[in-house]
Image (cartoon, grey):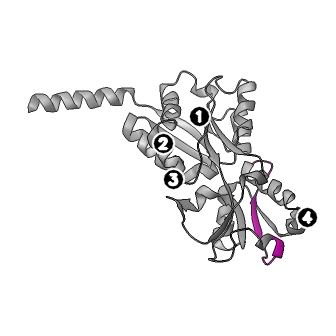
Amino acid sequence: MKRLSTLVVALLAAVGAHAAEVQVAVAANFTAPAQQIAAEFERQTGHKAVLSFGATGKFYAQIVNGAPFEVFLAADDTTPARLEKEGQAVAGTRFTYAVGTLVLWSAKPDFVDAKGDILNKGSFNKLAIANPKTAPYGAAAIETLSKMKLLAAVQPKFVQGENIAQTFQFASTGNADLGFVALSQVFKDGKLTAGSAWIVPGAMHEPILQDAVILGKGKDKPAAQAFLDYLKTPRAHAIITSFGYALR
């Protein structure tokens, strides 16, 4: 028994010696699944993913200015590609980890109809939207409103969030009657968690392809590669799809 205990301690010490932290910049829409994935990742590998959440555009500016992030989970595919082209990301590591879905949502039950006709009726005071210059979900919302020929009519009612997390906060606290948010923020295990919503058809905007990439500071870091590898596992995929994302 004593010999077995000694062996277990030795094995744990060996795992601890190789465990490391990885600094991960995560698009705000992916907050909930990223937290769950990080917890599973640590249990499975011993590595710890230290997560920071924000707008993709702002993360880009921080990364090019030397922020210590080693992995980037963006809300689009163009920003990681740009970082790769500029030599700020490791070539060949980029892939689409999730495909996002835009939703028009209100914390009020039965307020948003299943076809989004409330936008035509205009029976609301404030509409929350993420900054389209830095948040891909905000850009998708602008595309949707433009396609519906409603942008000019509803623009005076905009309440703009810095990122999709703040946009959701505006809608969830009543500072806005409704908002264009990520489905992952209001959806879990196949159902809406609260309020009422219109899931925006994908044809209304460009696909929200969300890419992951290892950044320059994560090059040759085993924990960074391990985190990206874990994102491709069946367990990570199950978590991602449970929040309403699609896989590519």
* Amino acid carrying mark 4 in the image: Ala
Task: Please tell me which residue lies in front, 34 or 23.
Answer: 34
Q: Kindly state the secondary structure of the residue where label 4 is placed.
A: helix
Q: Kindly state the secondary structure of the residue where label 2 is placed.
A: helix
Of badges 2 and 1, the one in the foreground is 2
- If you read the primary sequence from the N terminus, does the residue marked by circle 3 or circle 1 appear first? 1
* Amino acid carrying mark 2 in the image: Ala
Judged left or right of residue 129, residue 156 is: right
Q: CA distance from mark 2 to mark 4?
A: 41 Å
Of badges 3 and 1, the one in the foreground is 3
* Amino acid carrying mark 1 in the image: Val
User: What's the mark number on residue 152?
Assistant: 4
Residue 126 location in percent, x, y? 78, 72
- If you read the primary sequence from the N terminus, does the residue marked by circle 3 or circle 2 appear first? 2
- The stretch in magenta equals 120-135
Q: CA distance from mark 1 to mark 4?
A: 38 Å
- If you read the primary sequence from the N terminus, does the residue marked by circle 4 or circle 3 appear first? 4
How many residues crowd around disc 1 within 10 Å: few (fewer than 14), some, or many (20 or more)? many
Where does label 2 land, which residue?
236
Residue 17 location in percent, x, y? 35, 27
Residue 179 location in percent, x, y? 72, 65
Where does label 3 land, which residue?
242
Decide whether the magenta segment is chiefly helix, strand or loop. Answer: loop
User: What's the mark number on residue 71?
Assistant: 1
Q: Quadrant of the C terminus?
A: top right
Of badges 4 and 3, the one in the foreground is 3
Q: CA distance from mark 3 to mark 2?
A: 10 Å
From what the image shows, is residue 11 above or below residue 51? above
- If you read the primary sequence from the N terminus, does the residue marked by circle 2 or circle 4 appear first? 4
